[in-house]
Image (spheres, rainbow, N blue to C red):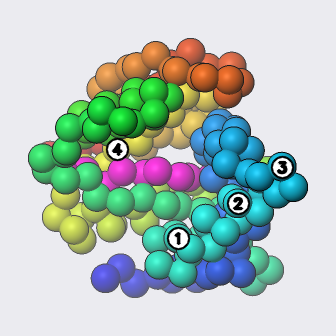
């Protein structure tokens, strides 16, 4: 287990509102689009997002930066199997390109969400959380790190490339009503070897 040092900690259910905001930012607005499609007529889509993040936090799946006043940045990820499962036939079309890319990075720790609140960007938290991701991947004896970024997210790509991630593949976005300035998803991988 990784020893978390201040200001890093495991997220709690109380972080759910901030986590939903971070997930939506990292997901290029796709999470809000999905929560809206899941919401009943009288239901707040953001409440769906908060509940989903609360559950993940309760399962210990999210790491956050907290300088003492609440979460300001977060990291969610998981190990990709050395032999990923094929895509199921019933997978929604908009997720297929993302899953195809993920499957091209077996035995890596997949950075699913990395984001900071707007007032806390440019302060090194992304790099600090990527260092944590590396420590987790090495602790789990994985071959490297992977993530997917939108082709129009230049700031994120600069960060990832600066710390050693390299492009491995691309897939065209399938939007199905979701609005994004991007056209492609890009798989970036940082191999340890």
Of pointers 3 and 2, the one earlier in the residue sequence: 3
Q: Is mark 1 on a helix, strand or loop?
A: helix
Which numbered circle lies on residue 56?
A: 1
Q: Please, which residue is most extreme toward the right here?
A: 42
Mark 1 vs mark 4, foreground winner is 1
Tell me where the magenta segment starts and ends, as one range.
107-117
Q: Is mark 2 on a helix, strand or loop?
A: helix
Q: Name the residue under label 3.
A: 41
Which numbered circle lies on residue 146?
A: 4
Of pointers 3 and 4, the one earlier in the residue sequence: 3
Mark 3 vs mark 4, foreground winner is 3
Q: Quadrant of the N terminus?
A: bottom left
Q: How far apart are marks 3 and 4 (CA)?
A: 37 Å
Q: How far apart are marks 1 and 2 (CA)?
A: 13 Å
Mark 2 vs mark 4, foreground winner is 2
Q: Is residue 65 above or below residue 152?
A: below
Mark 1 vs mark 3, foreground winner is 3
Q: Give coordinates of residue 156: x percent, y percent.
A: 58, 37
Q: Give coordinates of residue 154: x percent, y percent.
A: 61, 27
Q: Give coordinates of residue 113: x percent, y percent.
A: 53, 52
Can residue 137 be seen in the rendering of this structure?
A: yes
Q: How crowded is mark 2: few (under 14 residues within 10 Å), some or many (20 or more)?
A: some
Name the residue located 61 percent from the left edge and 29 percent from the top edge. 153
């Amino acid at each position: 287990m990784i020893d978390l040092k201040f200001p890093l900690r495991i997220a709690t259910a109380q972080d759910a509102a901030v986590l939903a905001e971070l997930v939506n930012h990292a997901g290029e607005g796709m999470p809000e689009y999905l929560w809206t499609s899941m919401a009943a007529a009288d239901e707040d889509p953001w409440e769906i997002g908060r509940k989903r993040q609360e559950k993940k936090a309760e399962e210990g799946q999210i790491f956050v930066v907290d300088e003492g006043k609440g979460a300001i940045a977060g990291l969610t990820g998981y190990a990709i199997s050395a032999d990923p499962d094929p895509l199921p036939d019933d997978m929604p079309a908009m997720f297929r390109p993302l899953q195809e890319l993920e499957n091209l990075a077996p035995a890596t720790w997949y950075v699913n969400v990395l984001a900071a609140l707007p007032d806390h960007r440019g302060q090194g938290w992304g790099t600090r959380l990527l260092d944590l991701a590396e420590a987790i991947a090495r602790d789990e004896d994985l071959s490297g790190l992977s993530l997917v970024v939108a082709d129009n997210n230049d700031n994120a790509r600069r960060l990832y490339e600066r710390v050693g991630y390299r492009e491995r593949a691309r897939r065209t976005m399938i939007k199905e009503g979701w609005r994004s300035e991007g056209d492609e998803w890009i798989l970036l991988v940082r191999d340890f070897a």
